[in-house]
Image: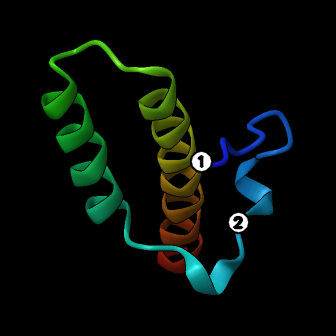
Amino acid sequence: MLTPRLGAMSPDSVAPGSVRSAAELNEQIRSLWLRSGGSLSDQERAEYALLVVEWAAAIRGEVVEAA
């Protein structure tokens, strides 16, 4: 499996139509930490970083919708 380039990722780079709900992403982040026992491997860190970027975009989208 290829490791994604994290340096190029930002919440603005996530396509608006592909964003999952912040609650769903938060649950996936919590699950990842529980499965890892609190110590993430390199692959898990990459997954975590992508989830956090997507979560931030979802939060921003929800705030804009609420406004």
Q: Is residue 23 left or right of residue 2?
A: left
Q: Which residue is mark 2?
A: 14
Name the mark on residue 35: none
Q: Residue at the location (58% across, 50% down)?
A: 1
Q: Residues within 10 Å of mark 1 (few under 14, many from 20)?
A: some
Q: Quadrant of residue 8?
A: top right
- Which residue is label 1 attached to? 53
Crowd tier of the residue under label 2, counting other residues whose Cα lies within 10 Å: few below 14, some 14–19, many 20 or above? some
Evaluate if marks 1 and 2 touch, with contact meaning CB atoms under 8 Å apart. Answer: yes
| Quadrant in the rendering for residue 44 | top left
Give percent across and percent down for residue 38.
22, 15
Identified by mark 1, the residue type is: Val
Which residue is nearer to you in this view: 63 or 58?
58
Q: Residue at x 45, y 37 (%)?
A: 48
Taking the spot 56% from the left edge, 47% from the top edge, the residue there is 50
Q: Position of residue 39 (x, y in %)?
A: 29, 12
* Amino acid at dot 2: Val
Placement of 30 over or under 61, stated as above or below:
above
Query: Which residue shows up at 48% across the image and 42% down it?
Result: 47
Q: Earlier in the sequence, mark 1 or mark 2?
A: 2
